[in-house]
Amino acid sequence: MQKLSIQGGYRLNGEVRISGAKNAALPIMCASLLTQDALHLDNLPDMHDVATMVKLLQQMGVQVDTSTQAATFSAAKVDKLEAPYDMVKTMRAAILVLGPLLTRFGEARVSLPGGCAIGSRPVDLHIKGLVAMGAEIHIEHGYIHATAKRLHGARICFDLISVTGTENLMMAAVLADGITVLENAAREPEVIDLADCLIAMGAKIEGAGSDKITIEGVSELHGANHSVMPDRIESGTFLVAAAAAGGNITLTGARVDTLDSVLEKLREAGAKIDVNADRINLVMSGRPQAVNVRTAPYPAFPTDMQAQFMALNTIAQGSAIVVETIFENRFMHVQELQRLGAQIEVEGNTAVILGCRQLDGATVMATDLRASASLVIAGMVAQGETIVDRIYHLDRGYEHIEAKLSSLGAKIQRIQ
């Protein structure tokens, strides 16, 4: 099993290019199932979840031609309307094939998904929406089996804001009869990116990026070219790493407009930040100030950045309160940070962090994707060597993170 070895105490300096967003790429890849024409995607990140989605689509019969940071998907000869358990157990995003398969082919059989163990993320919102659109759905032997002669438009109000629920039902609606209205829809930039791709394929969608999305079904979609948006969570992770370790870094190819809440918190921590088009420059000269964080759906502070800011707060001046409102199990990195000497107390969904001047290197274990990133940041500011185990979580959602950090001056390497 591979691990990361990190020598702490080195400042970050230099320039790094931001990769395409995993959370945008995965649903857009599933959108290829909606047409028999070719969908060409640029700026695809090279990471494990993307490779898993390619394999999943290929075993359904989608032809995938890949090149560096790009791929062409052709679903003209789909012959297997199933996403099996062994393909989806490590990746919850596999649920996103349900809507496209059902609306185009009238049937889908999808395993109940797996992914990071950060809490309950039920699929009932997807199922209720599809039933409202005329689907018959049964859950049997761990699989969702859905059928429909043809889906029809419906007004669907989400009980809870769900990014994948919004994306799945939006894709199902583009080929349904009539008009579908999604109320209390997710507003994330990745939802907008999916909508932009679908519109390029001939879909009629209005309101993406607001809490009300209206989709008028069409008879068929066609092929298109689309470039996946930059990864706002990777951007935030590198910025937090530089704020914690100190230094002067510049991100290129970033989407500044998707990072307002993160940049605001970094400025509170004492970082000097300048933005220009798709470039973000961060300078941090002293010890960061502690910052309070409360996660909430976009455009508020993202749950996917909570662990990274907790790592920053462990060595900040003062104390901070971190409140997690999205996932109930997303404090599993706390125990590992404590192994490095962090002073953190947790009660329910709230963590109180008292910053200390120095963490001490130790062996820690990653429990989920973003927890992995927090342990890397903590290792970069800890004294001595930190070993991060189970980095397959990290590889699911970051493109060559150790190579990128090394290019900025971090002492980090992958070991067996």
Image (tube, helix red, strand yellow):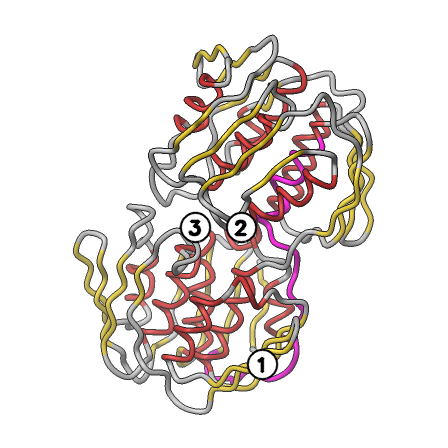
Q: In which quarter of the image is the C terminus?
A: bottom right
Q: Nearer the viewer, residue 264 or 56?
A: 264
Q: Tag 1 or tag 3, which sits nearer the N-term?
A: 1
The numbered mark at residue 368 is 3
For label 1, the residue is 281
Q: In which quarter of the image is residue 97?
A: top right
Q: How far apart are marks 2 and 1 (CA)?
A: 30 Å
Q: Residues within 10 Å of mark 3 (few under 14, many from 20)?
A: many
Q: Which of marks 3 and 2 is in front?
A: 3
Q: In which quarter of the image is residue 30?
A: top right
Q: Is residue 14 magenta?
A: yes
Which residue is found at the position 44% from the left and 22% from the top?
127
Q: In this view, does 366 lie above or below 329?
A: below
Q: What stretch is highlighted in magenta?
A: 8-32
Where is residue 279 drawn, in percent x and y?
64, 75
Dot 2 corresponds to which residue?
392
Q: Nearer the viewer, mark 3 or mark 1?
A: 1
* Spatial separation of the CA atoms under disc 3 and disc 1: 28 Å
Circles 3, 1 touching at the beta carbon (< 8 Å): no
Residue located 61% across and 79% down the image: 250
Point out the tag, 3 or 2, that comes first from the N-terminus: 3
182 in the magenta segment: no
SS at circle 3: loop
In this rendering, is residue 304 above or below 413?
A: above
